[in-house]
Image (cartoon, rainbow, N blue to C red):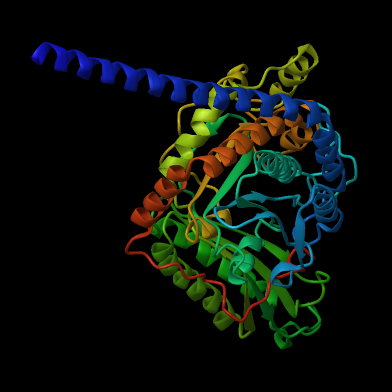
Amino acid sequence: MRNKSGSRAIGRLLFTIFLMIAIILPAAYRAADDRDEILRRMDERSAHYGDLSRRIWEFAEVGYKETRSSALLKNELRSAGFTIEENVAGIPTAFVASYGRGKPIIGILGEYDALPGLSQDSIPEKKVINSGAPGHGCGHNLFGVASAFAAVTIKDYLTEKKLPGTIRFYGTPAEEGGSGKVFMARAGVFDDCDVALVWHPSDQNRASMASSLANINAKFRFYGQASHAAGAPERGRSALDAVMIASHAIDLLREHVPQTTRIHYIITQGGAAPNIVPDFSELYVYARHPGMPTLDGIWNRILKCIEAGALATETRVEKQIIGSVYNLLPNEPLSRLFDHHMKYIGGIRYNPEEQAFAETLRKTMALSESPALGSESEIQSIGSGSGYASTDVGDVSWIVPTAEFNAATYVPGTPAHSWQAVACAGSSIGRKGMVFAARTLALSGIDLFTKPQLVEAAKADFEKRRSGFEYRSRIPADQKAPLNYRDK
């Protein structure tokens, strides 16, 4: 009897195993088939989105002035069936595009602002198109379009498979110092989002667990008394002197702050003519640190330097906070999800013309510690630690589980915010990296819709990392977005 009973038990076990194989393996193959089919369809549309990225590259509009760039993205998403909420947070170039209904709500962030003074042709030698004009030195022309491409791809998948949930594209202006996402966050647009996905142009392909630097920045306007600089200098009170004293005090302060701190400034206005004692001058100051509480203390010391300049020159000073962003809060499940799909997709491959472009461009750069040419075809290991840049994605990451990855849109060794980066962002090299980013976002987003456990894991990691910390923007609560912060 024991033998017969044992045989039946073994038979049931084998049947169970067979049933699991019959169910699970086809599902796995279907998932793989879906993934390959999604990528194939994206390949068919990649040229269209490449054209869109080139148009935004040509627009090259600075923060809060991205009128044509945001309109192009809105029209593309609207034509794909998305509902558009415009003028978010009172910002004409901010918008939210949504498709679907119910949970989960998966957001993809898109940026499209350019940098001032970086006009450059899309060739591997320095050639200004329009002197003093902006250029896409951070590749945001690629950033916004790749994110829109992914959002449309996910929308098509949800429709085809009749899946519940909402895909959102967040059109976020003025990342470069304007803190656009912070003002959008105040409008509550991220509050009901379950997960936010982000990427950024780079010279490498890498998912990241790294943080960033918190940032506070402001313009300080000094008001003095004009006078003839030679005939009656004693009657003048120089606003420029106030700026010089304040900036020198800040320079001395650099020796007495934690070494991970970054402080930089420019004098945006210094006077009208040398023979007039300047009655107005303006100093624009950035301060950064890996943690906002420590940065608060550093900023208070900077304010004392500013006060010293006004006190010593008998001038008056006014402060306007332009922006403030938090450090990024990493999310391990989401970063590993990105890494998984990046490895499946594989890196970027240059054709002979692109290889020649890359080799020529690299001759214009210092490359002592830069990634080697050829690394664009690789997927680097997940990053960690803290970088030295700042981004308003940081504020989003303290509100909703958020992760970011980099795609090699630049020739390896290219620094961001350079003419070389502008050249890459307008070239086929940049567009190849953009498509890689869109593919990674699309596959990762689809997984979040089809595997609820991934969303729950991301939320659990978010709550653990945020525990014990308070998110509070350092921008005054009654301050509106500085729509003219790029004006001279």
Q: Between residues 438 and 143, which one lies in front from this camera angle?
A: 438
Q: Classify the position of the C terminus by image quarter.
A: bottom right
Residue 158: where, in percent of width, then height?
Answer: 66, 43
Farthest residue to the front: give it: 1
Q: Is residue 383 in sight in this rendering? A: yes
Where 259 falls versus 426 (above or below)? Answer: below
Residue 126: where, in percent of width, then height?
Answer: 81, 32
Residue 53: where, in percent of width, then height?
Answer: 80, 39
At 61% across and 38% down in the image, what residue appears? 441
Q: Dividing the picture into quarters, in which one does residue 360 lie?
A: top right
Going by the image, does 257 lie left or right of 138?
left
Q: Dividing the picture into quarters, in which one does residue 276 lie?
A: bottom right
Going by the image, does 480 lie left or right of 82?
left
Q: Is residue 210 in sight in this rendering? A: no
Residue 487: where, in percent of width, then height?
Answer: 79, 65
Where 275 falls versus 97 (above or below)? Answer: below
Farthest residue to the bottom: give it: 235
At 60% across and 33% down in the image, what residue appears? 440
Going by the image, does 167 lie left or right of 390?
right
Going by the image, does 354 lie left or right of 263?
right
Q: Between residues 323 and 328, which one lies in front from this camera angle?
A: 328
